[in-house]
Amino acid sequence: MIKVDSLVKRYGDLLALDHFNLEIHKGEIFGLLGPNGSGKTTAINCMLSLLKYSKGEIHLFGEPMRCDNYSLKKRIGVVTQNVAVFNELTVVENIEYFCGLYVFNRARLKTLVDDAIAFSGLEDYRKFLPKKLSGGLLRRLNIACGIAHQPELIFLDEPTVAVDPQSRNHILEGIRKLNANGATVVYTSHYMEEVEQLCTRIMIMDKGKAVATGTKEELKAMIRTGEKLTAEVYSLSEPILNEIRNLNGLFHAVYENDLLTARHAAGGNHLALVLDILQRNNVAFRRVTSEPPTLNDVFLEITGKELKD
Amino acid sequence: MFWNIYKKRILISLRDKDILIWAWLFPLMLATLFHFAFANLDASGTLKTIQLGVIDNAAYQQDLNFQNVLESVSGESEDSLFKLWSLKNQEEADDLLENGEIDGYVIYEDMPLLMISTNGLRQTIIKGFLDRYLQTKDSVLRLIEENPEAYLILPELLTPLNYTERILLSNSTQTKTVGYFYALLAMACLYGGFQGLTVISQMQANLSAVGARVTVSSAGRFRLVAYDLLGGLTTHFLQILTLVAYINFALGISFGSQLWFVLFTCLISSLLGISFGAMISATSKLKEQVKIAILIVISNICCFLAGLMIGDINYVVMQKAPVVAWLNPAARISDAFYCLYYYDNYERFFLNIGIIFSMAIAMLVITAFFVRRQEYESL
Ligand SMILES: Nc1ncnc2c1ncn2[C@@H]1O[C@H](COP(=O)(O)OP(=O)(O)O)[C@@H](O)[C@H]1O
Ligand SMILES: [Mg+2]
C-alpha cells in the first residue's frame, strides 16, 4: 500500500528524515509514534508530495507518487495536523467543499456529506461556523472534511492534539470504524497510550529515523524489561539496595523519594524475591505494583530518553 | 466541481469581514464623505472663476478666432471658466499678477504665451486650455492644407463650443467632482485585491493549512484556482455595481449615458484588482497582514496620483511623467469612466481598457507561474 525507500529530507542544514524506510500493508492502522520534532509530519508531507525531498522513493498503491498524479490523490484522504477548514463556511458547507473536490455527482455528494456528519457526531452543529465549535468538535470537523469522500488510504496527522477525553474516544472509535470499513490508516501521534490502543502496527521514530517497528507485543519483546516493579519504601539503606541489585535477572534498581523502582526480565519471581529481602531486613513497605512495560519504556531503553513531553 | 467551488467562494467572500469592510463599506463611506465635502466646497465658493489677464496688443486684436474662443468661455457668471481682464501692457499685468488679482495672463506674440507666478490648479487649467487651443488650431490648419475643400466647413471646426462643451475642464460642480468619484471608484476596484489575496492564500500549501489541504486533494490545480478567483471576481463585481448605483442614484453623480460600457469598465477593472491581489499573495511568503499593507499602500499611491485626494493631480502627472500616468492602473480606470462621460469617440476609452486588461492578464500570468507549484522545499 505504501512503500518508502531511504527517504532523505533536509531543511537547509537540518536533517529531518535520515534514510527513512517504511512499508504499510492494506488494512493496517499504522502508527507513527515519536516526540515532537521527530519528523512525523515531514514524512507524511513527503508521502503526499507536498514536500520535495533530497533522496529516496515513495510508492503508493504500487505507483510512484507525484504531485500531479491526481488519480492517486483521489484515493487518499488527509487530515492535517493544523485544522484546515474555512472560517467563513459552516460545518456542512466545509465538508461539502472538501468532499466536492473529489466527488462531482450532486446526489452522491449529499449522501457522503450526511454520512460524514453522522460519522463525526456533528448532527447538532450543521449550521455552526468553526469559531463556535469547541476544540474537540473542531478536530472532528477537520477529520470529517478529510474522510468524507471515503478514501482507501487515510493519513491522520496528530488528530487528537488538544482534545477533551470524550472527543478523543469518539475520534479513536471513528478511526477503528473507518478501518473496519476497509480503509488503511496512517496515524501519527506523540501519545503512546493512544497508539498502543489503536494501532495494529507501530513505528517509533526519533530524529528522523525509525527506531523500531512492529506490533506492540513485538516492540515490547525487543527490550530487556519484561516487568516493572515499584514499591513505596521508607528508609532503604545502601547495602539492602545492593542486595536487591544483585538479584539475578534484575537490573536498573533505583531508590528515590521513598520510591523503589526496578526493572527485570520477564518470567522468574522477582517480585517475591525483592519483597523477601525487604521483609528479612525489617524494611517497611506499602503499595507494591508490578506492570508490563509501555511503549515509553521501549523508547526509553532504545534512545535513553523519555518519550513524554 | 465548478459550482461547488464557485458558490462556496462567493459565500466565503461575502462573509469575510475584512473584505466586506475594505472593499465595500469603506468606499461607500468615502463616497458619502466626498458628497458632503463637495457640497460645502461649492457653498463656500472656493472654486471660483479663474481670473485671466490678456494683453490687448495688435497681435491679439488680429486673431479674431482666439478672441472668440476665449470670450466664449469667459463671463461674469459663476459658471464661466475665466473672467477676462483686458490689460494695456505687461507692467500692468505683472502688477496684478503679483497682487494676486489675476491667476495668470496671456501675452500674444507669434502665439499666445502664458505668464504665471505660481504653479497651481488654476494655472494648470489655463495651460491646459491654451494647449488644447493650439493643438486644435494646428490640426485644423493642417487639415486645410491637405484638403482645401475643408475650408468650407471651417466655421464649424472652429466653433468655440467644440472646446467648451466636451474637452475643457470647466468649472461647474459636476465636472469638478466627477473626477474625485471616478478615482474613488478606481480605488474600490483595486481593493478587489483583497479578494485575490485571500483566494490565493487559501489555495497555496505554503501559505495556509487550508492551502495544504486543498493541494493534496485530487482537484486540478489551475481549474481549482480559476474557479475560486472567478467566485471572488463575481462578489467584487457585484459590490462595485452597488457602489456605482449608490454614487449615481443616491449622490447624483453621472456616468454618462452608456450604461453597458460603464458596466464593462467595472468588470475589467475588478478583474485587475483581483489579479493585483492574487499576484501580491502568490509571489511571496510574507505574513498576510504585511501583504494587505502592501496592497493598500500601492493602491492608495496609485489612487492619489489618479486624483483621489487632489483633483487634477492626474493632469499634472500626465504632463510631468506620462509613463507613470499611463501605467497607473487607478488613473486608467478613472480615465476610462471619464472618457465615457466626456468623449463621444471611444478611441481613448478603449486604449484605457486595453491597458487595464493587459495589466490584469500580465498579473494573472505571473500568479499562474507561482500557483502552478504544488511541491515545496519547506512549508
Ligand atoms: N519548514 C521547516 N523549516 C525548517 N525546519 C523544519 C520545518 N518544518 C519542520 N522542521 C524541523 O524538522 C524536524 C521535524 O519536524 P516535524 O516533521 O514537524 O516533526 P513532528 O511532526 O514529528 O513533530 C523538526 O526538527 C523541525 O524543527
Ligand atoms: Mg507533526
Image: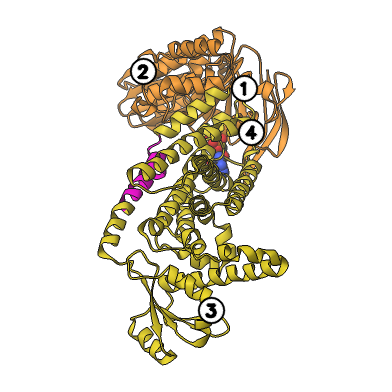
Chain colours: A orange, B yellow
Q: Quick one: label 1 or label 2, which is nearer the N terminus?
A: 2
- Hey, what amino acid is under mark 2? Tyr
Residue position marked by numbered label 2 in the rendering = A125
Figure quadrant, ligand 1: top right
Q: Secondary structure at mark 1?
A: strand
Query: Which residue is more in the foreground, B347 or B363?
Result: B347
Q: CA–CA distance between discs 1 and 2?
A: 40 Å
Q: Who's the residue at 35% across and 14% down the image? A: A124
Pointer 3 residue Cβ closer than 8 Å to ligand 1 = no
Q: Position of residue B5 (x, y in %)?
A: 53, 26
In the rendered view, tell whether residue B301 sits above or below residue A104: below
Segment tinted magenta in the rendering = B16-33
In front: label 4 or label 1: 4
- Give the foreground label among 4 and 2: 4
The N terminus of chain B lies in quadrant: top right
**Chain letter of disc 1 in the image:** A
Please name the predominant secondary structure of the magenta segment in the image. Answer: helix
Type of amino acid at the residue the image marks with label 1: Thr
Which is nearer the eye, B298 or B167?
B167
Discs 4, 1: same chain: no
Pointer 3 local density, CA inside 10 Å: few below 14, some 14–19, many at least 20: few
Residue, disc 4: B222
Q: What is the chain letter for disc 3?
A: B
Q: Is residue B208 visible?
A: no
Residue A213 tag number:
1
